[in-house]
Image (tube, rainbow, N blue to C red):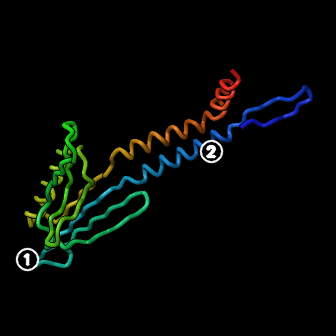
Amino acid sequence: MLIVVQPKSGLNLQPRSLGVRICSTLISITGIIFIGIGSVTGFACQRQSIAGISGDKNICVLDVSSGFTATDREIALTDLRRAALKQELPGGHSAYQRPAYQVVLLTRKGEIPLTDPSPTDKEEKLQTVEKINQFLWNPGKSDLQVNFGNYDWRDGLGLFLATVGIGAQLFAEQITHCCSEARET
């Protein structure tokens, strides 16, 4: 945007950085929204038994938090069968697509996903499955705590957009000046 300023020596056009600032703010907000879409999942179990008698403290809590929501779900330890690593094959015929892996809990009522399907971190997910199953199959263990970050391409894109938006905010005057010089030529 150009603002007409009339100094004593004649007309002078001065570029203003308002348009750059508005666009960079929108880019930054979009980036932050993309970052907020990612979620963190916590899975904690507590087993309390006295002389072989099951108590009411034998529960697991599944806590899923994202930038916008948070949900807790209690699962009775007796309802859990085991944890498994679920493999999803991609659709299509591309040889470059890799299978996606997801940690799920198998219960009496069905599957409960702990992670989003992703082709990365297969070994880490497999170790998590083993850790959960060791807890479930070993009555001597009293506590389990597992945390996951369900991040994918959205976080990388969000970080990129937020960085570009903030950078444009910081250098709005220089960007406007460069654009106005390019327009003059």
| First along the sequence among labels 1 and 2 | 2
Q: Residues within 10 Å of mark 1 (few under 14, many from 20)?
A: few
x%, y% of residue 73?
A: 28, 70
Question: Callout 1, which amino acid?
Answer: Ala
In what quadrant of the picture does the C terminus appear? top right
Q: Nearer the viewer, residue 135 or 167?
A: 167
Q: Is residue 19 left or right of residue 46?
A: right
Q: Residue at x 37, y 52 (%)?
A: 38
Q: Nearer the viewer, residue 140 or 36?
A: 36
Work out whether 171 lies above or below 150.
Answer: above
x%, y% of residue 146?
A: 24, 57
Mark 1, residue position: 51
Question: Callout 2, which amino acid?
Answer: Ile
Mark 2, residue position: 22
Distance of mark 1 from mark 2, alpha carbons? 67 Å
- Mark 1, mark 2: which one is toward the viewer? 2
